[in-house]
Amino acid sequence: MCSRGAAVLHFSRSGRLAALLVLAIGLSSPNGGLADDASSVIEARLRERVAQRPDEGAGWRLLGRHLLQQGRPLDSEAALRRAVALDPLSAAAHFDLARTLAALNEDSAAAETFHRVLELAPESEYAEAAQRELAALSATHAFAAIDGSGESHAFDDPDAGVLPADYRIRRFDGSDFDDPWRDAAMQRPAWWHRDRLDVLIETGVLFNGNVALAPLSRELAPDSRASWQGFFAPDVQLAVWDQPRWRSGPTLGGHFTLNEGNFRQYNLQSYRPGWFVELFAFHGERAFVPRVGYEFTHDEFDGDTLGNRHALHPSIAAYWNDRHASTLFWSIDHTAFADDGIMPRVTSQDGWTNVLGVAHDVTLPYRHWRLVRVGVDYSRADTVGSDFAYRGVSLFAESVFPIAGGVELAVQGSWGYRDYPDFQFDPSRNEHVWRAGAELRKHFTDCLTGALVINFDRFDSRNPLFDADRLLTGLVIEYRY
């Protein structure tokens, strides 16, 4: 008799809440929500409980969770904040509060609260769910931040959250480590022909299979979108001081795009002022050209700042003879994005990047095989956000094949691997980075060329949030003076 009475008393205080949840399931409406009458009954009982025991966090958590399920996140937030205040070590209460904050589009606060769940109960099911929610929040916010608005509509609209780019921007290996004058210098030693003013202008029309890439971006975006885009990219170098053994002066580069249809609001304006210093040293038939270039990059989309970058590019080109040349290069830059993401210690891409590598060119004596270039580099990104700090290595190669009538084919390719040691979620985002490309170029004059280009970039990661690729093809006109 006594035992039975104790069991009934226990049920009356705690078990009836479980019974209410069972009742809620049985009275669910066809669309997955509770029928109005059942919802009102459960809410009334939960409010009766918190009125009777206002200092019990579990009751407030159940009330807040129920209100969230009924689509009332504002009311839910008040109840769950009370639950967290009463039971600050409850991973369940923090998890429900984080979900409510996410429903209110308070992404930063939601991310911080999910992270608190990981700290409170790292081995629990709540922690596993919090990791999934954090990863989804991070990816959603990354694409929303792309358009500079900070709104979370990038995944809702298939035409939103786009960054345009051309075929030269961010090859993801050391093959684009330096300024646009490298290719010409490696093919023709600088002391053979030096102009005080060098001008390079590229323009054209491209079809881009993944336009979520900008000059400041560190990688491709996994949500592939396609668009036609026109671009204009001028680069100017002026040797204000031009002496036999050295020269120095300002550089000015830019990149501007015009996108089709709904993508036009994401037109890129990229400005890259800088300065360079070159030295010339000779030893027999060998020559060495140390160079240091500084460049400041400012990127805007439709007038909104995406970010700024300061970069220093020291290198030394060694011309061993008329067929062999090598370049040792180091690139160091610091990038600051306007938006650091929902939780900067995880999502911010701000920070330093270093690339150290070497490339070697061989000019061949064959009629239909003119140049071979191979190289290797080591890269390291020390970012504020743990999602983007990596160590990487890449190998790259290129060959040029003259065909006939001023037409030549250039083929490029590379492979790399990036390790993300601070990435907090599962599966790992470690990735293989592949690139393959070709261009068929026609030389109309010594200064004017046109090329059909095709490039493919691939980030091969087991984590689907970071698995991405880009196919890009089109027509490019180049004027070099």
Image (tube, rainbow, N blue to C red):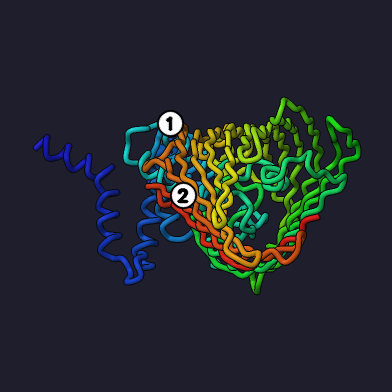
- Disc 1 residue crowd, few under 14, some 14–19, many 20+, Cα 10 Å: few
Give the x, y percent position of residue 337. 67, 44
Q: Residue at x 58, y 48 (%)?
A: 365
* Residue at point 49%, 54% (across, down): 436
Horizontal side of 196 relative to 82 (left or right) equals right
Q: Which residue is mark 1?
A: 119
Quarter of the image for the C terminus: give it. bottom right
Q: Position of residue 443 (x, y in %)?
A: 69, 63
User: Disc count in the image?
Assistant: 2
- Whether residue 99 is visible, yes or no, is no
Q: Amino acid at mark 2?
A: Trp
Question: Which residue is the site of mark 2?
Answer: 434
Residue closest to the far bottom: 261
User: Is any part of residue 189 visible from this angle?
Assistant: yes
Question: In which quadrant will I find the N terminus?
Answer: top left
Residue located 79% across and 38% down the image: 191
Which mark sits nearer the N-terminus, 1 or 2?
1
**Where is residue 290 drawn, in percent x and y?**
73, 30
Crowd band around label 2 with a 10 angstrom C-alpha radius: few (<14), some (14–19), many (20+): many
